[in-house]
C-alpha cells in the first residue's frame, strides 16, 4: 500500500498578512498615496485635454439625435426607449438615448451640460482602464 503524505498546514503568506490586518486593506500608505497621485494626474490631464470641448456647439447629427428627436423631447420618452423602441428610436442604443433624454431634461439646448457629461464619462472610462 502507498503511504499518504501529510499536507503542510503552514499558512500562505498572503492569508497570514490578511489575517494580521484584521480583514482590512493590506496596501501600505505609500502605495495608496502613489495610487491617488496617479489618479489625480489622469483626471487633471484628461480634463485639460478635453476642456476645449466645453465651449463647443451642436455638431453633425446632434440635431437629429437630440434637439429634433421626439423621443428625447417627450417626457414619456424614457418609457418608449425601453418598451417601444421600434416606433421611437432611429437606432437601438437605449443607454445612449437614455443619457440624451436625461441630459435634455436637465439642460435643454445648452451644450455646456452635454459636453461636461461627455468629459466626465471619458474620465471615468480612463480611470477604469
Image (spheres, rainbow, N blue to C red):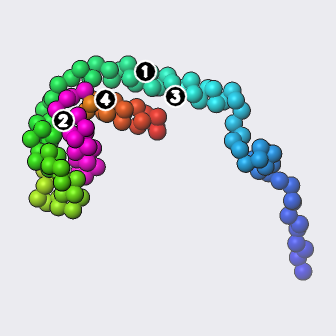
The residue beneath circle 2 is: 108
Name the mark nearer the viewer: 4 or 1.
4
N-terminal label among 3 and 2: 3
Q: Which residues are magenta?
A: 93-112
Q: Which quadrant of the view contains residue 112? A: top left
Name the mark nearer the viewer: 2 or 4.
2
N-terminal label among 4 and 1: 1
Secondary structure beneath dot 4 equals: helix
Whole-angstrom CA distance, mark 4 to mark 3, is 19 Å
Q: Position of residue 120 (x, y in %)?
A: 37, 32
Whole-angstrom CA distance, mark 3 to mark 2, is 32 Å
N-terminal label among 1 and 3: 3
Whole-angstrom CA distance, mark 4 to mark 1, is 15 Å
N-terminal label among 2 and 1: 1
Secondary structure beneath dot 2 equals: loop
Question: How many marks can you see?
Answer: 4
Residue at 47 percent of width and 26 percent of height:
42
The residue beneath circle 3 is: 39
The residue beneath circle 1 is: 45
Principal secondary structure, stretch drawn in magenta: helix
Numbered badge on residue 120: none
Q: Counting other residues with Cα less than 10 Å from the Cα at mark 1, is it few (<14), some (14-19), or many (20 or more)?
A: few
Residue at 81 percent of width and 45 percent of height:
20
Whole-angstrom CA distance, mark 2 to mark 4, is 14 Å
Numbered badge on residue 116: 4
Task: Please state if 21 lies on the left or on the right of 116 as rendered.
Answer: right
Q: Position of residue 90 (x, y in %)?
A: 13, 50
Task: Please state if 23 lies on the left or on the right of 108 as rendered.
Answer: right
Amino acid at each position: 500500500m502507498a503511504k499518504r503524505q501529510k499536507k503542510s498546514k503552514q499558512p500562505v503568506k498572503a492569508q497570514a498578512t490578511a489575517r494580521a490586518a484584521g480583514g482590512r486593506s493590506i496596501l501600505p500608505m505609500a502605495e495608496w498615496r502613489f495610487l491617488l497621485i496617479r489618479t489625480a494626474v489622469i483626471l487633471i490631464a484628461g480634463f485639460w485635454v478635453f476642456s476645449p470641448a466645453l465651449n463647443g456647439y451642436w455638431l453633425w447629427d446632434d440635431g437629429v439625435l437630440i434637439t429634433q428627436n421626439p423621443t428625447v423631447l417627450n417626457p414619456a420618452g424614457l418609457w418608449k426607449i425601453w418598451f417601444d423602441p421600434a416606433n421611437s428610436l432611429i437606432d437601438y442604443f437605449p443607454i445612449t438615448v437614455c443619457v440624451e433624454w436625461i441630459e435634455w431634461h436637465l439642460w435643454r439646448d445648452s451644450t455646456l451640460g452635454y459636453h461636461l457629461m461627455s468629459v466626465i464619462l471619458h474620465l471615468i472610462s480612463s480611470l477604469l482602464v
